[in-house]
Amino acid sequence: MVGDNVETGIFQLRDALALAEEQELDLVEISPSANPPVCKIMDYKKFLYEQKKKQKEIKSKSAKVVVKEIRLGPNTDDHDFDFKLKHAIKFLQDGAKVKVDVFFKGRSIIYKDKGEYILLRFAQELEEYGKVERLPKLEGKRMIMIVAPKK
């Protein structure tokens, strides 16, 4: 009864279950919507384990983007500028993106051009370590620029 269907691979459910039990494996339904439904004899726990392992491998290979933030003011002094520049260089060398923003407090919003100048100068200093992903743009009381590391 079971032997004559081995060539075609088409079995009745009870025959397939018997065959799976004989091999000490599981009968797993692969495509229930097909006519007739498609089943496969396999070790189901091993299949789940391998699937989980593949998912984990895919997840570990995907790059995690880290964004570090550096905040400046429109009247940032040269020493503070250099100090924060060194931090930005370190972040870019570590492979993180750097979000540089100039925060305008109170009436300092009238110095928008100073803020843009500081950000462009910052981008110019970081030119050999990263490239500007987003140019300075004013959003509310902040002017934001994003620098991505060079590959």
Image: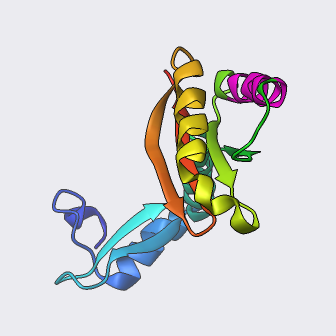
* Of residues 20 and 35, the one drawn nearer to the viewer in this rendering: 35
Task: Write down the quadrant of residue 79 in the picture.
Answer: top right
- The residue nearer to you, when weighing 123 against 24, is 123
* Secondary structure, magenta segment, majority class: helix
Please report the residue visible at 22 percent of the width from the left and 63 percent of the height from the top: 9
Expressed as whole percent of the image width and height from the top left, the position of residue 58 reads: 53, 45
In the rendered image, residue 107, in percent from the top left (x then y), is placed at 70, 66
Residue 147 can be seen in this image: yes
Name which residue lies at 19% across and 82% down. Answer: 36
The reply to whether residue 57 is in sight is no
Give the residues drawn in magenta, as a range. Answer: 79-91
Identify which residue is drawn at 79% across, 32% down.
77
User: For residue 37, which quarter of the picture?
Assistant: bottom left
Whether residue 89 is in magenta: the answer is: yes
Q: Residue furthest top?
A: 128
Quadrant of the snapshot with the N terminus: bottom left
- Give the mark count: 0
Q: Residue at x 52, y 33 (%)?
A: 120
Q: Is residue 42 above or below residue 149?
A: below
* 91 or 26, nearer to the observer: 91
